[in-house]
Amino acid sequence: MNDYRILVVDDEEDLCEILQFNLENEGYVVDTANSAEEALRMDIAGYHLLLLDVMMGEMSGFKLASMLKKDKKCAHIPIIFITAKDTENDLMTGFNLGADDYISKPFSLREVIARVRAVLRRTKPDAADEQQSALLSFGTLTLDNNKKKAMVDNTDVALTKKEFEILQLLLTHKGRVYSREEILDKLWREDTYVLDRTIDVNITRLRRKLGEYGKFIATRLGYGYCFDAE
């Protein structure tokens, strides 16, 4: 078994099941979504590879890929387009969006598996770089993204999922001011009805839990919040 997680997005449920079954037999952890909209409700940042169909309902695979490439949490994830569209223009559109490969229907499962292996091998980060990128730190405040843990002075700080994600966002982009709307859009995407006040409540709790480091989560009146490291 390996630790690679793959998301297959295709509106043909039978095809999703076939790809899931065969890729899981190769040792991958595979999830499926039958629309781009369903995929967006998932934690896409947690996957190592996306297999996207181009022609889907309301939102195409091209549109989904374009959105993900603009999201810093997902921009690094390799994409393989699987589609019946194989004209030169379609191929160029896919590669211009940052696709790593393009498989035309009909295809053999051996071809898909071979291409998945090749893309994962080509895009696999160096182990040392991967470990380093998983750690965020400021002074004795450390966030371990792999373990989803926060520590101050090597002591665990019990954060909720949203508190951790807010701190991760602000600490990753020190000095960058995020409005409440931006934070809601990035971290509460799956929740339709969330008030701006929710951000304030989480920030207040986060500051309290971080002790001396809470003061670095600054309020910019009329704009939002940032991690002020200066």
Image (spheres, rainbow, N blue to C red):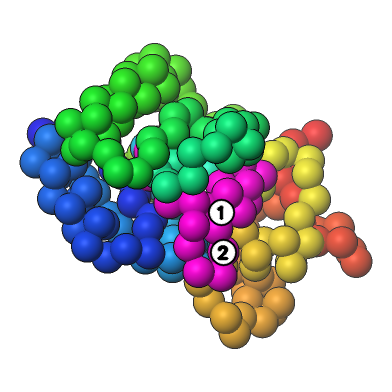
Counting from the top left corner in percent of width and height, residue 205 is at: 57, 67
Q: Secondary structure at mark 2?
A: loop
Where is the N terminus found, in terms of image quarters? top left
Note whether residue 195 is visible: yes
Residue farthest front in this picture: 87
- The residue that mark 2 highlights is 59
- The residue that mark 1 highlights is 64
Q: Report whether 185 appears left or right of 127.
A: right
Note whether residue 210 is visible: no
Give the alpha-carbon distance from disc 1 to disc 2, as whole Å. 7 Å
Residue found at x 44% / y 18% = 129
Span colored in magenta: 49-70
* Residue 222 image label: none
Q: How many marks?
A: 2
Q: Secondary structure at mark 1?
A: helix
Residue found at x 57% / y 81% = 192
